[in-house]
């Protein structure tokens, strides 16, 4: 940037006029403003996971603080896993109001988002287990017999997780939750597809569909 003293000397020596000096200063301010705008956009689009040394220290402190709260809770509330998970989720949300909303710490924000999501999923899993009285099946036939109950439990578990993650993402805009939501939707789609296919096989709908297109089935078998 041209210093004001240099421009004044140029006017005094007759190299430039006052009008030209003002134009040069206006041009310099315009260029500086454009450069600042580009830098701001670059900062907004910076997708690095770690925001710097401070972010690392804040992340370590966040993990230690949540671990400390967890050990305090299991000491004060022995056996109350549902309430422990709920309190941890609320605590992670409260920390995110400072770490994410105010300071935009990238790594620590992602860690807090994952802690919140895991706590919510644990609480939902316990609630589903208590509501549907689901036990681990010993054989594949027991698992198939429980498909209707398991489907409702899966919808409640995955749907509740998606809702909680979506609300958190709407509030804090943490990118890692977009992946969590996508995985949950994929699992929901897989669950629904498995149930539909099994019901189709047991009711004979899949067999009827294959008999409706015998020529296609024959050509497909011949090609193989």
Image (tube, rainbow, N blue to C red):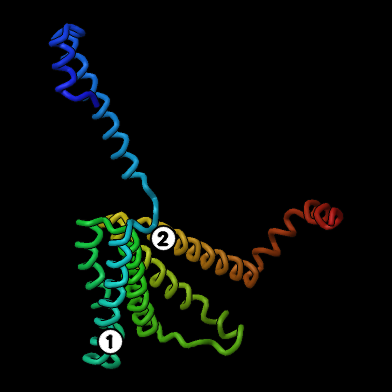
Q: Residue at the right extreme?
A: 222
Residue under pointer 1: 71
Is the residue under label 2 in contact with that under label 1 (CB below 8 Å)?
Answer: no
Query: Is residue 79 depicted above or below 96 in this figure?
Result: below
Residue under pointer 2: 181
Q: Nearer the viewer, mark 1 or mark 2?
A: 1
Q: Residue at the front extreme?
A: 13
Label 1 to label 2, Cα distance in Å?
29 Å
23 left or right of 62 in image: left
Mark 1 neighbour density, 10 Å: few (under 14) some (14–19) many (20 or more):
few
Q: Secondary structure at mark 2?
A: helix
Q: Secondary structure at mark 1?
A: helix
- Residue 23 percent across, percent down from the top left: 19, 14
Q: Residue at x 39, y 83 (%)?
A: 129
Q: Residue at x 19, y 25 (%)?
A: 3
Position of the C terminus by quadrant: bottom right
Could you say which quadrant of the image residue 166 lies in?
bottom left
- Name the residue nearer the viewer: 31 or 132: 31
Query: Is residue 26 depicted above or below 165 in this figure?
Result: above
Position of the N terminus by quadrant: top left
102 left or right of 133 in image: left
- Residue 50 percent across, percent down from the top left: 36, 58
Q: Earlier in the sequence, mark 1 or mark 2?
A: 1
């Amino acid at each position: 940037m041209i210093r004001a003293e240099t421009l004044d000397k140029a006017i005094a020596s007759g190299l430039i006029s006052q009008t030209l000096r003002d134009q040069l200063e206006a041009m310099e301010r315009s260029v500086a403003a454009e450069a600042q705008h580009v830098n701001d956009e670059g900062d907004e689009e910076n997708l690095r996971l770690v925001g710097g040394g401070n972010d690392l220290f804040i992340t370590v402190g966040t993990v230690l603080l949540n671990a400390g709260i967890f050990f305090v809770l299991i000491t004060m509330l022995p056996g109350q896993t549902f309430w422990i998970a709920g309190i941890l989720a609320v605590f992670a949300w409260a920390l995110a109001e400072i770490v994410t909303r105010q300071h935009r710490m990238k790594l620590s924000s992602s860690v807090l988002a994952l802690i919140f999501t895991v706590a919510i999923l644990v609480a939902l899993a316990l609630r589903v287990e208590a509501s549907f009285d689901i036990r681990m099946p010993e054989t594949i036939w027991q698992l198939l017999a429980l498909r209707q109950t398991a489907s409702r439990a899966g919808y409640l578990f995955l749907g509740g997780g998606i809702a909680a993650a979506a609300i958190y993402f709407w509030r804090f805009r943490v990118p890692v939750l977009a992946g969590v939501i996508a995985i949950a939707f994929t699992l929901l789609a897989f669950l629904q597809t498995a149930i539909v296919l099994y019901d189709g096989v047991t009711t004979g709908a899949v067999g009827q569909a294959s008999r409706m297109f015998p020529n296609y089935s024959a050509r497909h078998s011949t090609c193989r």
